[in-house]
């Protein structure tokens, strides 16, 4: 049994690492905004400024976990980071539009609004990464 588990892990270790990193990145992504919001709120730091800081932290953390834990690439750090950050920057720009709409128009608490938006990002990013970002990695795998 132990040998079978080891063989399965060796065949799918990148997928297992991707799932583990995804779980950690999701937790960090969902926890960072409310944590920073609560920490900076007494200083009247706006929820959009909190979003900018939280997104930078989350994207950078996600990049590090994907580069060094999941894919273990040894490529050009600067180019890889720019590509990764650019992709996630699009989500950030959408977030900059949606968060004020959710807070100002729908009168949602900023922490709840950002959590809802984060869930939408998590779900949509799975499909995007599976179909586009990591397509060559997933080619021929189920």
Image (cartoon, helix red, strand yellow):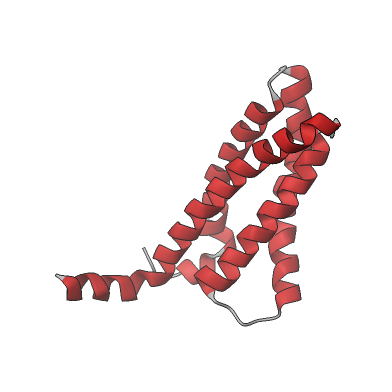
Q: Residue at x 83, y 40 (%)?
A: 49
Whether residue 43 is visible here, answered yes or no, is yes
Q: Nearer the viewer, residue 139 or 23?
A: 23
User: Is 128 placed left or right of 11 in the picture?
Assistant: right
Task: Write down the quadrant of residue 73 in the picture.
Answer: bottom right
- The answer to whether 76 is drawn above or below residue 126 in the figure is below
Q: Residue at x 78, y 21 (%)?
A: 104
Q: Residue at x 74, y 53 (%)?
A: 56
- The answer to whether 71 is drawn above or below residue 94 in the figure is below
- The answer to whether 139 is drawn above or below residue 52 in the figure is below
User: Is 104 placed left or right of 19 in the picture?
Assistant: right
* Residue 83, percent from left and from top: 72, 66
- The answer to whether 73 is drawn above or below residue 38 in the figure is below
Task: Write down the quadrant of residue 119 in the picture.
Answer: top right
User: Is 47 placed left or right of 60 in the picture?
Assistant: right
Q: Residue at x 53, y 43 (%)?
A: 123
Which residue sits furthest left? Answer: 1
């Amino acid at each position: 049994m132990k040998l079978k588990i080891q063989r399965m892990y060796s065949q799918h270790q990148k997928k297992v690492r991707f799932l583990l990193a995804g779980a950690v990145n999701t937790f960090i992504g969902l926890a960072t905004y409310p944590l920073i919001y609560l920490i900076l709120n007494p200083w009247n730091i706006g929820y959009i400024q909190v979003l900018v800081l939280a997104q930078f932290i989350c994207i950078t953390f996600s990049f590090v976990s994907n580069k060094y834990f999941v894919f273990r690439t040894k490529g050009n750090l600067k180019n890889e980071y720019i590509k990764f950050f650019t992709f996630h920057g699009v989500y950030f720009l959408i977030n900059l539009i949606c968060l004020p709409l959710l807070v100002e128009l729908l009168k949602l608490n900023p922490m709840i609004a950002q959590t809802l938006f984060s869930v939408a990002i998590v779900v949509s990013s799975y499909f995007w990464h599976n179909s586009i970002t990591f397509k060559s990695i997933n080619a021929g795998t189920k």
